[in-house]
Image (cartoon, rainbow, N blue to C red):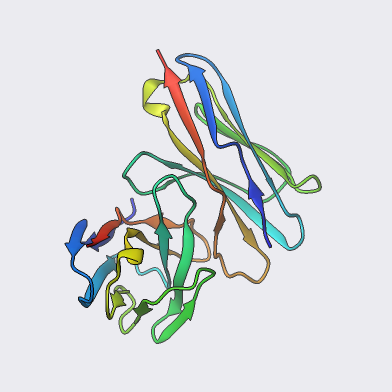
Amino acid sequence: GQNIDQPTEMTATEGAIVQINCTYQTSGFNGLFWYQQHAGEAPTFLSYNVLDGLEEKGRFSSFLSRSKGYSYLLLKELQMKDSASYLCAVTFVGSARQLTFGSGTQLTVLP
Amino acid sequence: EADIYQTPRYLVIGTGKKITLECSQTMGHDKMYWYQQDPGMELHLIHYSYGVNSTEKGDLSSESTVSRIRTEHFPLTLESARPSHTSQYLCASSTIYSPLHFGNGTRLTVT
């Protein structure tokens, strides 16, 4: 299979920094996406990593290590509206951009 | 900004009924997808299309069928709904250069 693992739940405080990890099977790996999904809503695109390193976009950053099969999403200056599920999703070579999703990490931001 | 529309947003229907979930996008994307998502669970790909007259089954076995007669339209049909079909159905589209853009989903309940 193409297991994608991420923690089920995380809790953090408003204003803090949180790191959500994702590991995946490296065989055939092509690229990795992070999506945010609020309850009852559709996922929205956050970031895309295909090369090793850090991609920064405002308060959100995403890191990838292809050799280790590891990524993380870093959220800084947490706000209450950041409470959502964060989905790690991977494309594999030959999959024509079909995404395989992890189960998501439910982040709760407390005041 | 992504323009992909799903109707209906919510549907409650009795067992045995035939239903069609509509999905349309105005971005000219060649690739379209249907995902199924139960509450708190990961998204599972049930159908995808690379272009007009091209449809394929996804990773998750589904009793639904799809058609792609026009680029912008990718409806999903259940010939005979059952309670096991109760779920959220998310439509998405992309090109080779863009991430998946999701519609708002159809939440289906079969009684």
Q: Position of residue A109 (x, y in %)?
A: 44, 21
Q: How many numbered marks appear? A: 0
At horizontal 47% and vertical 56% (from top left) the residue drawn is B43
Q: Position of residue B37 (x, y in %)?
A: 41, 55
At horizontal 20% and vertical 76% (from top left) the residue drawn is B17
Is A18 positioned to the left or the right of B16 in the image? right
Is B110 positioned to the left or the right of B32 in the image? left
Can residue B27 be seen?
A: no
Residue extending farthest to the right is A67
Is A30 positioned to the left or the right of B90 in the image? right
- The answer to whether A102 is drawn above or below residue B14 in the figure is above
- The answer to whether A60 is drawn above or below residue A11 in the figure is below
- The answer to whether A27 is drawn above or below residue A89 in the figure is below
At horizontal 30% and vertical 76% (from top left) the residue drawn is B78
At horizontal 75% and vertical 47% (from top left) the residue drawn is A69
Q: Which quadrant holds the N terminus of chain A?
A: bottom right
The residue nearer to you, when weighing A22 against B40, is B40
The residue nearer to you, when weighing B108 against B70, is B108
Q: Position of residue B30 (x, y in %)?
A: 42, 73
Is B67 positioned to the left or the right of A89 in the image? left
Residue extending farthest to the bottom is B53
Q: Position of residue B34 (x, y in %)?
A: 40, 66
Q: Which quadrant holds the C terminus of chain A?
A: top left
Can residue A12 be seen?
A: yes
